[in-house]
Image (tube, grey):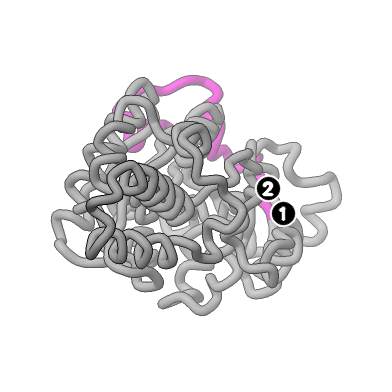
Amino acid sequence: MALARWAGGVESEAESSFLDSSRLAGDLDSSLDFDLDSSAVDSGADARLDSGVRSRILPIVLFGGSFDPPHLGHVKIIKALCENPSIVRVIIIPAFCNPFKSAPIAPIAKRIEWLKRACEGLAKAQVSDIEQRRAKMMYAIEWIEHFRAEFGAKADEKIILALGADALASLHKWKDADKIAKLACVLPITRESAFLDSRILDSGDIIASAQKKGFICLKPLDIDAPISSSELRAAIKSYKTSEAQKANKARPESKNIESKNIESKSAESKNADSAKLESSADSITKWLIPNIAAEILKIY
């Protein structure tokens, strides 16, 4: 099957065999290997599969999020996806807003610009402005339907939806979850983080639970990125507050209303999300994307 409809006419022997009928996508009872090769399914898989469970997988990954701000953890994920030879396109979708979080600090146009600069050199990466153009939040099922149509997906082809383990834990509660299960397979992204609730730290249990609810899950992509955007924002805020307090102590004559405001901000910054993240300059710059770091530090 030619991949011109996805890859802009660029095709290789390895890519053209990706959706060959002999390369079975998998079944609802076992996790697929991330490389999507025939080795992902053991020799006894055919006997376990009912007709109709088999499905082909589009070599297209949807990776959405607030990206408020984007950081090196995001870049690690995107780079790992782009380096997988079975994947043709990685579509990054900045959210207009997130229904589970407060309104973004940085406007979507700025987050799109940052992501494009962060993805420079990654030929397979494509930053989508679909939510900016629609000027509203979109549900995951809307992304899936839009991009399946854009890439000409056939009825039995599933697009890949990359999700963090925390999001996967609640996927069955999302809008039109049954349709998501039919039209997409899930690529779980796992990482260590103080931000994750203790109830959902076991990604293995989360994936097993998702599969029991009808979602096809690929082998997890484990990323060494113990940071989230909310943790990074909190660390930047805490660091700036600390620096302001130091500057204020050096100017005793200004210890009035300004000092009270700083103390208030300091208390506010001590939240659970950043409890395990040091607020030093080193810990912040470790996760900032170099070519956009200065702008991020000005905004957050």
Looking at the magenta stretch, what is its main secondary structure?
A: loop
Magenta stretch in the rendered image: 2-26
Could you say which is closer to the camera, residue 129 or residue 270? Answer: 270
Could you say which is closer to the camera, residue 204 or residue 36? Answer: 204
Asked if residue 197 can be seen in this view, the reply is yes
Vertical placement of 5 versus 254: above or below?
above
What residue is pinned by disc 2? 219
Q: Residue furthest front?
A: 253
| Residue type at numbered disc 1 | Ser
In the figure, is residue 54 to the left or right of 59?
Answer: right
What is the x, y in percent for residue 294?
Answer: 28, 32
The numbered disc on residue 31 is 1
In the figure, is residue 275 to the left or right of 252?
Answer: right
What is the x, y in percent for residue 11?
Answer: 41, 23
What is the x, y in percent for residue 93?
Answer: 33, 50
Mark positioned earlier in the residue sequence (1 or 2): 1
CA gap between label 1 and label 2 equals 6 Å
Could you say which is closer to the camera, residue 283 or residue 216? Answer: 283
In the figure, is residue 71 to the left or right of 205?
Answer: left
Q: Residues within 10 Å of mark 1 (few under 14, many from 20)?
A: some
**Secondary structure at numbered mark 2:** loop
| Residue type at numbered disc 2 | Lys
Residue drawn at x 49%, y 59% is 184
Labelled pair 1, 2 in contact (Cβ < 8 Å): yes
**Secondary structure at numbered mark 1:** loop
